[in-house]
Image (cartoon, rainbow, N blue to C red):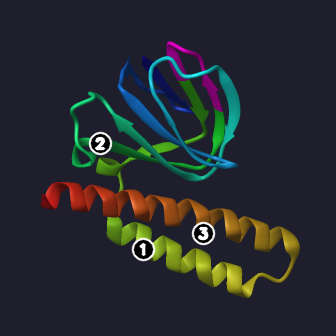
C-alpha cells in the first residue's frame, strides 16, 4: 500500500510500505494493505513504518507527530500533520531539556491558556524523546 506522510513543510514519505502503526484518539492502530476505509484524527504520538513484511521491529522507521488527520483506503494511507520528525532528526539531549522546560512551564502555569500550551509542549517533547530513544535502541542492535 502507498503511504503518504505530509507535513506543513511538504511530503515526508510517498512510497509503498507493508504496515503503518498510527496514534489515534482511541489508541494505536496498525494498517496493512486492504484495510477498511477510515478517516480519523491522529493524536500526538509515534508513527511507525514497516516497509517490508520481513522487516523486524528493529528495521522500522519512527516519526514523532503532534496530531492531524488520517485517511485510509484499501490501497493508501494518507497522514496530514503539522510536523513529523524522523528519529534521525531528533537530538535526544535537546528533547530531554525541552521536556524539562515544558514540565516546568506546566507546573508554573497561572491560567488555563498557559496550562494548555504547556500540556501541548509536554506532549510534543515526550513523543520526540520516545522516538529518539527508539532510534538509539535501533542503532545499538
- Name the residue at 67% across, 25% down: 38
Residue 69 placement (x, y as % from top left): 67, 33
Residue 91 in sight in this render: no
- Residue 96 has which mark? 1
Residue 130 placement (x, y as % from top left): 42, 62
Residue 63 placement (x, y as % from top left): 42, 45
- Which quarter of the figure has residue 7? top right
| Magenta span dominant secondary structure | strand
Residue 9 placement (x, y as % from top left): 52, 32
- Name the residue at 32% across, 58% down: 134
- Badge 2 crowding class, 10 Å Cα cut-off, few under 14, some 14 to 19, many 20 or more, is some
- Is 91 rendered above or below residue 58? below
**What secondary structure is found at the residue carrying circle 1?**
helix
Disc 1 + disc 3, Cβ < 8 Å: no
- Residue 35 has which mark? none
Q: Nearer the viewer, residue 89 or 27?
A: 27
Start and end of the magenta stretch?
Answer: 70-77
Q: Is residue 140 left or right of residue 35?
A: left
Chain-order first, disc 1 or disc 2: 2
**Which residue is labeled 3 in the image?**
122
Chain-order first, disc 3 or disc 2: 2
**Which residue is labeled 2 in the image?**
60
Task: Please state which of the two labelled residues, at mark 3 or mark 2, is closer to the viewer.
Answer: 2
Q: Is residue 52 left or right of residue 130?
A: left
**What secondary structure is found at the residue carrying circle 2?**
loop
Task: Please state which of the two labelled residues, at mark 1 or mark 2, is closer to the viewer.
Answer: 2
Disc 1 to disc 2, how far (Cα)?
23 Å
Disc 3 + disc 2, Cβ < 8 Å: no
Residue 76, magenta (yes or no): yes
Chain-order first, disc 1 or disc 3: 1
- Badge 3 crowding class, 10 Å Cα cut-off, few under 14, some 14 to 19, many 20 or more, is many
Disc 1 to disc 3, how far (Cα)?
10 Å
Amino acid at each position: 500500500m502507498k503511504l503518504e506522510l505530509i507535513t506543513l513543510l511538504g511530503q515526508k514519505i510517498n512510497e509503498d510500505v507493508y504496515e503503518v502503526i498510527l496514534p489515534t484518539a482511541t489508541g494505536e492502530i496498525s494498517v496493512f494493505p486492504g484495510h477498511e476505509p477510515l478517516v480519523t484524527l491522529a493524536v500526538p504520538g509515534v508513527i511507525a513504518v514497516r516497509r517490508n513484511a520481513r522487516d523486524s521491529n528493529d528495521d522500522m522507521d519512527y516519526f514523532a507527530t503532534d496530531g492531524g488527520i488520517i485517511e485510509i483506503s484499501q490501497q493508501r494511507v494518507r497522514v496530514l500533520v503539522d510536523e513529523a520528525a524522523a528519529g534521525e532528526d531528533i537530538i535526544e539531549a535537546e528533547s530531554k531539556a525541552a521536556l524539562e522546560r515544558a514540565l516546568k512551564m506546566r507546573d508554573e502555569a497561572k491560567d488555563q491558556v498557559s496550562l494548555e500550551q504547556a500540556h501541548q509542549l509536554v506532549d510534543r517533547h515526550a513523543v520526540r524523546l520516545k522516538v529518539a530513544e527508539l532510534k538509539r535502541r535501533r542503532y545499538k542492535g
